[in-house]
């Protein structure tokens, strides 16, 4: 074949492929246009999961009749004048591509009327062929109708998923936009079924229920944080509420839904050591920042951004989220069923947490009703926050470690759990998980002060490992030695341990070394800055007292005191709970003394 310029229809279909991938991407572009036009009401109607029909009606500024033909041309926009403007974009659109792209792969009709026009105007585009503008009666605003998407690109049609999947993508998209723009009224319907309708009254938590369900929405923690031009708002889940993937993590940056952002990582770091391995939080977070600090012109679908100062944004998001999580961290309570002998269900309720029972409900105290945090008094730096309930009881809460009150030791059960009494009931403490947490925090504190005392062994210990494990340890020697171990290669696949961190004096050094190899294999490559905490967590896990180990009363008391001093006493470094709380109220209910359920 000779080199030739592609016919315009082909070129525009190629370009369209980048913007319009599926029905949901059409909805996204049209909704963004409506938002850019200042609409207060946006109504989306779909047919055939968006394949046969997508109609988006808005009450925004409208398009003047004489500009209609331009609106559907490629690179035609009213939002950008010069290349300089690219670096301070305040609108969602700016590439002037969406309508042209949609018009080249569907039958497109735009009907629009600006407020100052006596009548509306209508323009049809079919497979890229632009028709003539006609005058029609129309309300102020714009109505865009897209029929038979991809009718002229059968290859694309084949890539569409089942109807349910495409419909879910549209649902998810619109719900997220509704959440990002709570002052705009959104409506989504297919035929006679209405799947979303928002009030446009600015109340985000009500919309949150549409996204996650009522129960989950109620438990989400509200984030509000502001710092030198950066502002973060929205919701994140408490530690007890997780998913097995990151799909429920949503970020909007300056009103734009952004996927694949490093901010997801920042959020995950905020939960570090608080979630079980393989569990992820839910989040809908809205970041506002000066437009010139963020480059939105990275990808045609505008779903990626670059920050001018990524570290600053990253750390701001991480700190803001962490502060919120710690301020609300609860001591898990036992679900009611757990005490009624339906032990399996009960255990599940505890493990599943939020979907379960009255247990795990955050910030909720059965006696006082829902707790509310007075945000005006919410400190930025980890000093005490004031939490008050409706009955005017005001409790002062230390965000860092407040939720574990001073406990009176009662004893040990099953050589595995400590039993203690607090001002508000009974606490069962998993001795292994608690000790893990204590060791971990001590080790990391010494590490942060760059001084980890080390203790030489009287007789160095030689540890032999399998070749694969030996390779893994070799890679971690520097980290190990940094933590106060003295470990050296000692012939093939063997290592000599000459010293251990003083914290672990008296424990089995070979066990510590072996602990490190255990789950390395299945681990995805950890982030560099997480390696140290991971290594530390693993060593602590191995060296902490085990279940089955009888502790003397002194040892029990010491462990309890040390746990009380921890910054995150409620979970072990791997995210399992260290304690279960049976409140007096719960006991009273179980004994039939109070409002039986
Ligand atoms: P962009 O949004 O990047 O400017 P589009 O192809 O999406 O490009 O839209 C082209 C132009 O059409 C916009 O710049 C805007 O002036 C006009 N437009 C599109 N949709 C609407 C709408 N719903 N209300 C008002 N004007 C609109
Ligand atoms: Mg647009």
Image (tube, rainbow, N blue to C red):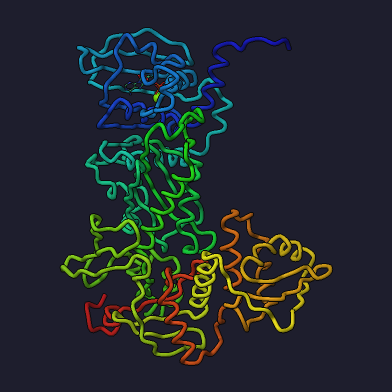
Q: Residue furthest left?
A: 392
For residue 390, side relative to residue 83 (left or right): left
Residue 579 in the image, given as x and y percentages of width and height: 42, 76
Q: Residue at x 48, y 42 (%)?
A: 310
Q: Residue at x 33, y 36 (%)?
A: 189
Residue 260 in the image, given as x and y percentages of width and height: 51, 42
Q: Residue 287, relative to residue 103: is it above or below?
A: below
Give residue 542's quadrant in the image.
Answer: bottom right
Q: Residue furthest right?
A: 492
Q: Residue at x 30, y 22 (%)?
A: 142
Give residue 366's quadrant in the image.
Answer: bottom left
Q: Nearer the viewer, residue 46 or 294?
A: 294
Residue 111 in the image, given as x and y percentages of width and height: 31, 17
Q: Residue 48, relative to residue 488: is it above or below?
A: above
Q: Is residue 175 visible?
A: no
Q: Residue 580, relative to residue 289: is it above or below?
A: below
Give the number of marks.
Answer: 0
Q: Is residue 431 visible?
A: yes
Residue 217 in the image, given as x and y percentages of width and height: 33, 54
- The quadrant in which the N terminus is found is top right
Q: Residue 301, relative to residue 514: is it above or below?
A: above
Q: Nearer the viewer, residue 342 or 199?
A: 199
Q: Residue at x 22, y 77 (%)?
A: 595
Q: If the picture is divided into quarters, which one holds ligand 2?
A: top left
């Amino acid at each position: 074949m000779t080199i030739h310029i592609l016919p315009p229809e082909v070129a525009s279909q190629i370009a369209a492929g980048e913007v319009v991938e599926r029905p949901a991407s059409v909805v996204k572009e049209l909704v963004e246009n409506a938002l850019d036009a200042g609409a207060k009401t946006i109504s989306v109607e779909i047919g055939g999961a968006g394949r046969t029909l997508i109609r988006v009606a808005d009450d925004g500024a409208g398009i003047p009749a004489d500009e209609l033909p331009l609106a559907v041309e490629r690179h035609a926009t009213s939002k950008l004048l010069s290349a300089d403007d690219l670096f301070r974009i305040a609108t969602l659109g700016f590439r002037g591509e969406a309508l042209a792209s949609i018009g080249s792969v569907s039958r497109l009709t735009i009907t629009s009327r600006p407020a100052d026009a006596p009548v509306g105007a209508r323009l049809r585009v079919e497979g890229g062929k632009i028709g003539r503008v006609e005058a029609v009666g129309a309300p102020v605003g714009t109505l865009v109708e897209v029929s038979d998407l991809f009718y002229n690109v059968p290859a694309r049609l084949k890539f569409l998923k089942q109807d349910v999947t495409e419909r879910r993508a549209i649902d998810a998209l619109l719900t997220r936009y509704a959440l990002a723009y709570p002052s705009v009224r959104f409506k989504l319907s297919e035929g006679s079924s209405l799947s979303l309708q928002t009030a446009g009254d600015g109340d985000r938590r009500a919309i949150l229920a549409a996204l996650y369900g009522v129960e989950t929405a109620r438990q989400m923690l509200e984030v509000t944080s502001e710092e030198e031009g950066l502002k973060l708002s929205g919701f994140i889940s408490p530690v007890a509420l997780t998913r097995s993937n990151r799909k429920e993590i949503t970020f909007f940056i300056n009103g734009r839904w952004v996927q694949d952002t490093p901010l997801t990582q920042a959020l995950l770091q905020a939960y570090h050591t608080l979630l079980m391995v393989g569990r992820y939080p839910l989040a809908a977070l809205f970041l506002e920042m000066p437009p010139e600090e963020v480059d939105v012109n990275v990808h045609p679908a505008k779903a990626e951004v670059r920050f001018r100062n990524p570290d600053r944004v990253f750390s701001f998001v991480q700190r803001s989220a962490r502060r919120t999580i710690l301020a609300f961290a609860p001591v898990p309570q036992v679900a009611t069923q757990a005490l009624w002998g339906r032990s399996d269900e009960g255990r599940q309720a505890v493990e599943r947490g939020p979907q379960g029972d009255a247990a795990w409900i955050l910030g909720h105290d059965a006696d006082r009703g829902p707790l509310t945090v007075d945000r005006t008094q919410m400190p930025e730096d980890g000093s005490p926050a004031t939490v008050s309930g409706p009955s005017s009881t005001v409790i002062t809460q230390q965000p860092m470690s407040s939720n574990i009150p001073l406990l009176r030791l009662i004893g040990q059960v099953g050589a595995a759990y400590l039993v203690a009494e607090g001002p508000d009931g009974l606490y069962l403490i998993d001795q292994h998980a608690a000790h893990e947490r204590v060791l971990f925090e001590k080790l990391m504190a010494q590490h942060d002060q760059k001084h980890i005392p080390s203790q030489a062994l009287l007789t160095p210990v030689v540890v032999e490992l399998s070749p694969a494990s030996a390779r893994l340890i070799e890679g971690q020697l520097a980290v190990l030695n940094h933590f106060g171990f003295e470990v050296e290669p000692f012939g093939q696949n063997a290592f000599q341990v000459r010293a251990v961190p003083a914290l672990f004096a008296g424990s089995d050094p070979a066990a510590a070394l072996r602990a490190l190899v255990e789950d390395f294999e299945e681990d995805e490559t950890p982030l560099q800055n997480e390696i140290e905490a991971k290594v530390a967590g693993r060593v602590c896990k191995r060296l902490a007292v085990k279940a089955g180990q009888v502790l003397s009363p002194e040892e029990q008391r010491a462990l309890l005191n040390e746990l009380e001093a921890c910054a995150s006493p409620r979970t072990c470094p791997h995210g399992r709970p260290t304690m279960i709380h049976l409140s007096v109220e719960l006991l009273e209910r179980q004994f039939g003394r109070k409002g039986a359920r």
